[in-house]
Amino acid sequence: MFQYHNVSLTSYQAEVLGIQLVSVQSSGEKDLELLDLREALNKAKSLGARGIVTGALLSDYQRLNINMIAEELGLKVFSPLWRKDQEKYLRWLVRENYEFIITSASAMGFPFELIGKVITASDVEKIIDSSRKYKFNPAFEGGEAETFVLYAPLFKRKLIVEGKPIKLGEYEWEYRIERIR
């Protein structure tokens, strides 16, 4: 249910957003992770949160569990990306000046040369073309890849990362962030 690549670096994103980061360790085990989510949402509520915004696009498992736990805690949920067209969503991100890198990918046919590179409009088209040919989700909702946002319209400044791409297997690559500022 949770992305784990570079999760320790989300404190930098919280800083450039100007928000407090609520962090809870998770085992990542199915069902047990829901207890971890409940703890995190309850912690956020205790700090004054009245609702949460999700980035859920397609996963019923994610959306239903987030909604269920939030409702139990009396929190509102807003999922503005829910069921958006995956290809249009990717194009929209670049058009709206989001800057992100792909930090891991594990799908046959994925354009692995994009690992660690700030994704451009032409890169989005490469991803979409490959996803159509090899049948993976272009927005990575099946876990085909993970991303890290370097800049978004609400950020006060851009994050700059340095690292290196590592080939882990025939269809598996990772970008190891070594420095961030």
Image (cartoon, grey):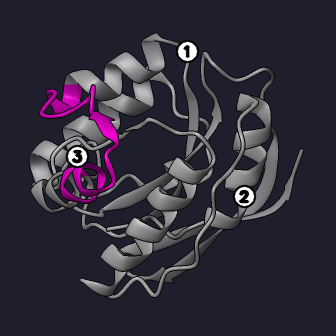
Disc sitting over residue 149 in the figure? none
Label whose residue precedes the other's in the sequence (2 or 1)? 2
Q: Quadrant of the N terminus?
A: bottom left
Of 153 and 166, the residue lying toward us: 153
Say few, some or many: other residues with alpha carbon within 10 Å of mark 2 (under 14 / 14 to 19 / 20 or more): few
Q: Secondary structure at mark 1?
A: loop
* Amino acid beneath label 1: Asn
Say few, some or many: other residues with alpha carbon within 10 Å of mark 1 (under 14 / 14 to 19 / 20 or more): few
Q: Quadrant of residue 155?
A: top right
Label whose residue precedes the other's in the sequence (1 or 3)? 1
The location of residue 148, given as percent across then percent down, is 58, 48
In the figure, is residue 119 to the left or right of 129? Answer: right
Mark 2–mark 1 Cα distance, whole angstroms, equals 21 Å
Q: Which residue is mark 2?
A: 9
* Amino acid beneath label 3: Ser
The location of residue 7, given as percent across then percent down, is 61, 64
